[in-house]
Each structure stands twice: as C-alpha cells, then as structure tokens.
Amino acid sequence: MYNLQPAPSIGHRLTTWFQARASFRALQLQRLRQAKLVFHVCLGYTIVTTLIWLFLMITGMDGGLFFGNYRITLMQVVSCTITFILFWMVWSYGFYWLKHWQLQRAGFSKNELRQAFGSRLHGFSLELILRRHSERQIRIIDMIGRRGRNVLLIIVSFALVYSRVSKNPQPGDLAFGLQASLFDALVMSWWTLLTFHDEGVLGHMAYGAQARVLDGIQGRAHALCAMTLWTAFKFVMIPIGLALAVVYKPHTYAVLYAFIWLSYGIADFTAEIFGSIWGRHNIHVWGFGDINRKSWEGVLMAFVCTLAVNMAIVWFNHLSMPWVVLGVGLAVVNPLVELCSPRGTDDFTMATTNALICLGYGWLVFAS
C-alpha cells in the first residue's frame, strides 16, 4: 500500500512563503543593524584614540614614555600624503576596476555590480546573488581584489622598515614599528570612516577592492573593523615594544620585527589565498559577514608558509637554536589564532599574540 500525503493547500503554501519572507527580512535587518553598530563603535573609538594621541603628543604628560619624543614633521606629512594618494587612491581604485571587470566577466549585471560596490546599507541580498553565480568564483575574485591590493604596500613597507632597523636598530622601532606608522594608521582610519557611506568614486577607492561580495550587507563593516583594529594594535604595540626593547639585544630588533609582523602577514595572506582557491573542507566560524567560513587547507598552508619564512629568517641571520624554537612556535600559533579569531579581528589578534609570545619567550630564555 502507498502512503499518499495530500498536496499542501494554496493557503498553506502562501503561509509558508510569507513566513520564509518574514524570516529573511528579519535576518537582513539584523545584519544591517550590526553593520551600523560596527560603524558607530569604530567612529567612537577613533575619536577617543585620536584625542588621546593628540593630547599626549602635544603635552608630553606621559613623561615622554610613549609620545613625549613623538612629533609630526613636514617630511612625515609629505610621506603620508604621497602614500595616501598613490596607494589608497590610485592603486586601490585600479584594483576596484580589476574586481569590477572580473565580476562583470562572471556574469554580474549592471544592477548587481552597482549593489556590490555600494555601501549595501540600502538593500543587498547575497542570497539572490548566489542563486545566479558561483560562490567559489566570487570567493576567488574577492581574494584577488583584497590581497592584490594590499600585497605591494606590505612588501614595500616591510622591506623599508626591515632594512632600516637592520642597519640602525633603535628601541623606538619596536614600540612604533616606525613612528610614522601610527600617524598613518589614524589618517587611514578616518579615511575609511568618512567614505563608509559613499556610493561613488571615494567609496570605490576605499572599499571597492577591500569589501568582500560574500560578506553581504556587512562587507564594508568587516573592512572597517579590520582597519580600526589594526590602528588599535599600533597603540597596543607601544608598551609591548618598549618591553621587548629591554629584553632583547638591539641587533635582534629586525628579526623580532619580522617575527611579529611578517609571520602574521604570511599566515593571514596564505590562509585566504589557498583557502579560496583549493579549500574544500569548510570550518564554520563567527564574524562580520553573511558567510563566515574558513578551510583546513588554508590553515595548513598558513602553517607551512609561515614556518618556511621564519626558518629562512633564522638561517639568513645565523641565529641559534632558541630562535628556531621561537620561529616554529609562531608558525604553529599564527594559523590557530587566525582560525579561532572572529572574522574581521584576526589582524589585531594575530599581531598582538605574536608580540606577546616574543615578549614572554624573551623573558624566559634571553633575559635569564
């Protein structure tokens, strides 16, 4: 005998449709509220930190410990302006057009492109996008835009700082990672805040390549959170850097700089690059974005690449076995911190963890 179930009535199907529609709209409103909350929290934080930075820099009331000897020079302003124009405007706008072209080739309509590169705060449905387009293809395009845009600045910045610190190491190098970088970070934070709602050229420069399509409504919120936390790390690094300068010898400052900054950068880049292209075993994580997934393939390659870079640094500088142990430890920890950190926060958590591990290891091994 067959157990035949009666077909759902028209009324039942309409009720189900309305319930699904209401649930979808409620989810969209929740994502929108979260995106707006991120903006207001980042705005409040940036206002407070900018005022504290200005007050301590001008008055020197910290006794010269942090900002007493920190003064903005004309050369620094010129350097920041040139970097801002070349990277944050010209270079970033170029990668916006590259991403725009790639999405167009992937079949995005004019309306979908307009929504993807807008603020997404006035209506954006990632679910509808994914009905027409491949998630994997979009993930790869997102990765190319983000990582391609950032890789040149990271390579050039690291090479310049590493070379300078190697030749003339100073305690302040570990505290500020270059004094100008703190000023630059504040300028970039205000740039991302002021362009957050912009739907035109300025918004495309700041967020076109950086905001993932797969982050949906929270695409710009994710990018803004990452930038703001990066600025926060510059402040956190001041007391940690000063402590590192006491524990370690000056000739090791360049190596420490590489272990803290380059290890995190390599792990972060390779995790997204390999995970986007070859990732198949997904790990669901929490964070800012409509889709929050990472992959075991990305985690594994982050470990392999970070280990290779750290060992190359040890070999190049003819360091002893304790440095090998530290390099291996950072290679293990970085991918795990990247995996466990909520998406949008890993820039801060990975760099801070690296600095604290180096500080703790230095107290245990090199200060004894």
Image (tube, rainbow, N blue to C red):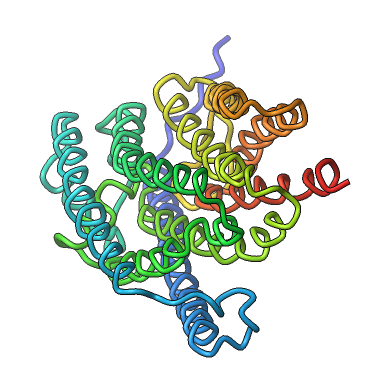
Marker count (numbered): 0
Q: Nearer the viewer, residue 16 or 319?
A: 319
Residue 121 point in image, percent of width and height? 31, 63
Q: Spot the residue most to the front.
A: 168
**Quarter of the image where the N terminus is located:** top right
Q: Nearer the viewer, residue 35 or 1?
A: 35
- Locate residue 26: give its quadrant: bottom left
Q: Is residue 127 visible?
A: no
Residue 18 point in image, percent of width and height? 39, 53
Q: Nearer the viewer, residue 212 or 156?
A: 156
Q: Is residue 46 visible?
A: yes
The relative height of residue 144 versus residue 19 in the rendered view (above or below) is above
The structure residue drawn at horizontal position 21% and vertical position 56%, both measured from the top left corner, is 205
The structure residue drawn at horizontal position 20% and vertical position 48%, both measured from the top left corner, is 91
The relative height of residue 40 versus residue 2 in the rendered view (above or below) is below
Q: Spot the residue most to the top.
A: 1
Residue 366 point in image, percent of width and height? 81, 43
The structure residue drawn at horizontal position 64% and vertical position 26%, both measured from the top left corner, is 318
- In the displayed structure, does residue 45 sit left or right of residue 18? right
Residue 221 point in image, percent of width and height? 41, 59
- In the displayed structure, does residue 262 sit left or right of residue 236? left
- Locate residue 76: give its quadrant: bottom left
The structure residue drawn at horizontal position 19% and vertical position 35%, both measured from the top left corner, is 103
- In the displayed structure, does residue 140 sit left or right of residue 358? left
Q: Spot the residue most to the right.
A: 368
